[in-house]
């Protein structure tokens, strides 16, 4: 009787323990990792709830935040990130597949690059995908990559889940970067030079400058005002190409525009597009604010440009707001004497 009672009590205890384990919630990111399987099964569906992404390295933490349907960089005033780069990283995370277990010895984590990223000298990255409550949908330590050059052979990377001992070699391309500059879409505009028909420039302490393009497919910008002024053709071409492949070095909200505007240039382009450029100077750096108007194209550009001020290369100041001296014909360099000729 006592043996039967003990067996019944033991069975009841086991059943209770099993029920408790089944009923205890397990976050999705804590699912068991097994060789040959996805690192995060079902992650693609859970990513719809993602509102924040953190990428931490030893000396910095990058934050991406979701605003509606757009992901932005808060440290850049909410400037949108490159959607293709974000898509590449998230798809890579959902498709990451565990190939084989590696070390579970903490002393070896540094060799694989999966140690604590807060440790000085660590090369590890901690990637965390969070929902609006701050709960992790996925988090993973990313270590050294192994790039393979053979065809049809996937890339691989060492990974480890925070709080777990086991490190893994995983297959798949997972491009995560903690440098905010790599997340910015630097393109401002790409308007061909032949579209620029007229440029009116007002600059402090300078006479008004007006350039205009004549008729005909081969016509180039010429100085219209001051009348009769000769100008360097290369300098005029630089003004015509001011918006070709235009990119920025840095970006800030327009309300934080550094320095003061030193000029105002009005570019009249074909198809009814008008663009006004307001260059600012700040400790030798050139920042520009842009306004666009006219046509649907102008409305699209205005909506894109209005919230921002862009830092561009210092050489662009001569394209957007040249002085008269910048347009003067350049003196031809004296010809070098032929080899062996006596010096004069």
Image (cartoon, rainbow, N blue to C red):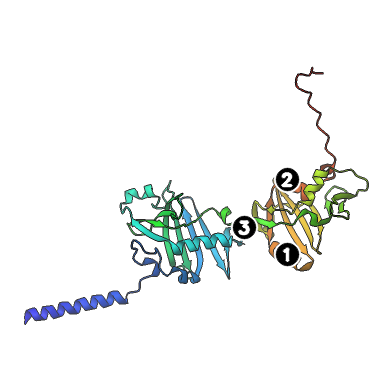
Vertical relation: 209 (above or below) 52 = above
Residue at the disc numbered 3: 185
Q: Can residue 117 be seen in this view?
A: no
From mark 3 to mark 1, how far is it between C-alphas? 17 Å
Q: Is residue 151 left or right of residue 250?
A: left
- Residue 296, quarter of picture: bottom right
Label 2 vs 3, first from the N-terminus: 3
Q: In this view, does 167 lie to the left or right of 77?
A: left
> What secondary structure is found at the residue carrying circle 2?
helix
> What secondary structure is found at the residue carrying circle 3?
loop
Q: Position of residue 274 (x, y in %)?
A: 80, 61
Q: Mark 2 Cα within 10 Å, few/some/many (few <14, many 20+)?
A: few
> What secondary structure is found at the residue carrying circle 1?
helix
From mark 1 to mark 2, how far is it between C-alphas? 24 Å
Determine the residue located farthest toward the top in the rendered image.
342
Q: Which of marks 3 and 1 is in front?
A: 3
Q: Mark 1 Cα within 10 Å, few/some/many (few <14, many 20+)?
A: some
Label 1 vs 2, first from the N-terminus: 1
Residue at the disc numbered 2: 315
**The C terminus - image quarter:** top right
Residue at the disc numbered 1: 302
Nearer to the camera, 41 or 302: 41
Nearer to the camera, 117 or 192: 192
Q: Where is residue 149 in the image (x, y as percent from the top left)?
A: 46, 49
Q: Can residue 59 be seen in this view?
A: yes
From mark 2 to mark 3, how far is it between C-alphas? 21 Å
Label 3 vs 1, first from the N-terminus: 3
Q: Is residue 195 left or right of residue 68?
A: right
């Amino acid at each position: 009787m006592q043996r039967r009672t003990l067996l019944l009590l033991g069975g009841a205890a086991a059943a209770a323990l099993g029920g408790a384990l089944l009923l205890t919630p397990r976050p999705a990111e804590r699912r068991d990792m097994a060789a040959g399987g996805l690192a995060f099964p079902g992650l693609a569906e859970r990513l719809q709830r993602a509102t924040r992404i953190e990428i931490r390295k030893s000396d910095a933490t990058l934050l991406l935040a979701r605003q509606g349907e757009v992901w932005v960089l808060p440290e850049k005033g909410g400037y949108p990130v490159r959607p293709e780069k974000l898509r590449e990283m998230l798809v890579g995370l959902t498709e990451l597949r565990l190939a084989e277990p590696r070390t579970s010895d903490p002393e070896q984590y540094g060799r694989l690059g999966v140690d604590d990223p807060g440790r000085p000298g660590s090369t590890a990255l901690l990637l965390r995908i969070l929902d609006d409550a701050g709960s992790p949908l996925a988090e993973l330590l990313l270590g050294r990559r192994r790039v393979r050059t053979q065809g049809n052979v996937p890339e691989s990377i060492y990974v480890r889940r925070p709080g777990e001992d086991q490190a893994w070699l995983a297959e798949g391309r997972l491009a995560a970067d903690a440098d905010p500059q790599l997340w910015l879409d630097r393109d401002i505009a790409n308007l061909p030079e032949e579209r620029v028909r007229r440029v009116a420039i007002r600059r402090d302490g300078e006479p008004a400058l007006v350039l205009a393009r004549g008729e005909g497919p081969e016509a180039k910008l010429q100085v219209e005002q001051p009348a009769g002024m000769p100008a360097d053709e290369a300098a005029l071409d630089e003004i015509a190409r001011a918006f070709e492949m235009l990119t920025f070095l840095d970006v800030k909200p327009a309300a934080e525009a550094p320095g003061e505007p030193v000029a105002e240039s009005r570019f009249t382009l074909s198809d009814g597009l008008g663009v006004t450029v307001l260059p600012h100077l700040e400790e030798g750096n050139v920042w520009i604010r842009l306004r666009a108007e006219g046509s649907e194209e102008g409305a699209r550009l205005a909506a894109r440009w209005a919230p921002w001020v862009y830092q561009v290369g210092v050489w662009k100041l001569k394209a957007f707001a040249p002085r008269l001296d910048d347009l003067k014909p350049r003196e031809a360099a004296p010809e070098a004497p032929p080899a062996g000729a006596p010096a004069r």
